[in-house]
Amino acid sequence: MTKKNNNWPVWKRDDKTIVSCTEKIKVMGDNFDEIQQIIQDAFEDGLLMEVMDEQMRQTLRNIINNLHNPIKKK
């Protein structure tokens, strides 16, 4: 079961206005709760397999840094 995090940021659009649609906010929260749990599980698995803590953290940062925005506005 995914643990709920009630501390996600106020989501904003590119023009800095706040996303106020309740359903969009719920979907974002659910998505990030799930991502957080998946990452935590993978991190703990790595620790159990004796992988270095810092190496796993760096790999996770690399994954984030390499995300591609397929709908970037021109």
Image (cartoon, rainbow, N blue to C red):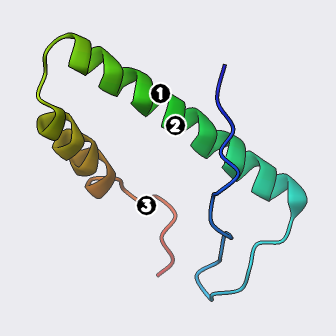
Verify CB contact (< 8 Å) between mark 2 and mark 3: no
Looking at the picture, how far across and down is residue 45, in whole percent?
A: 31, 15
Q: Which residue is mark 1?
A: 38
Which residue sits at x=52%, y=30%? 37
Q: Which residue is mark 3?
A: 69
Q: CA distance from mark 2 to mark 3?
A: 18 Å
Looking at the picture, how far across and down is residue 49, in whole percent?
A: 18, 10
Looking at the picture, how far across and down is residue 34, in whole percent?
A: 59, 33
Between circles 2 and 3, the one closer to the viewer is 2
Q: Which residue is mark 2?
A: 35
Q: Please identify the residue farthest to the right as the structure is shown.
A: 22
- Residue 62, above or below 44: below
Q: Is residue 24 left or right of residue 6?
A: right
Q: Is residue 29 left or right of residue 71?
A: right
Which residue sits at x=32%, y=27%? 43
Q: Secondary structure at mark 1?
A: helix
- Residue 31, above or below 26: above
Q: Is residue 64 left or right of residue 29?
A: left
- Res 66 label: none
Q: CA distance from mark 2 to mark 1?
A: 5 Å
Verify CB contact (< 8 Å) between mark 2 and mark 1: yes
Looking at the picture, how far across and down is residue 63, in whole percent?
A: 28, 45
Between circles 3 and 1, the one closer to the viewer is 1
- Residue 40, above or below 20: above
Which residue sits at x=52%, y=37%? 35
Q: Secondary structure at mark 2?
A: helix
Name the residue type under label 1: Ile
Near mark 2 (Cα within 10 A), the count class, few <14, some 14-19 or many ≥20, is: few
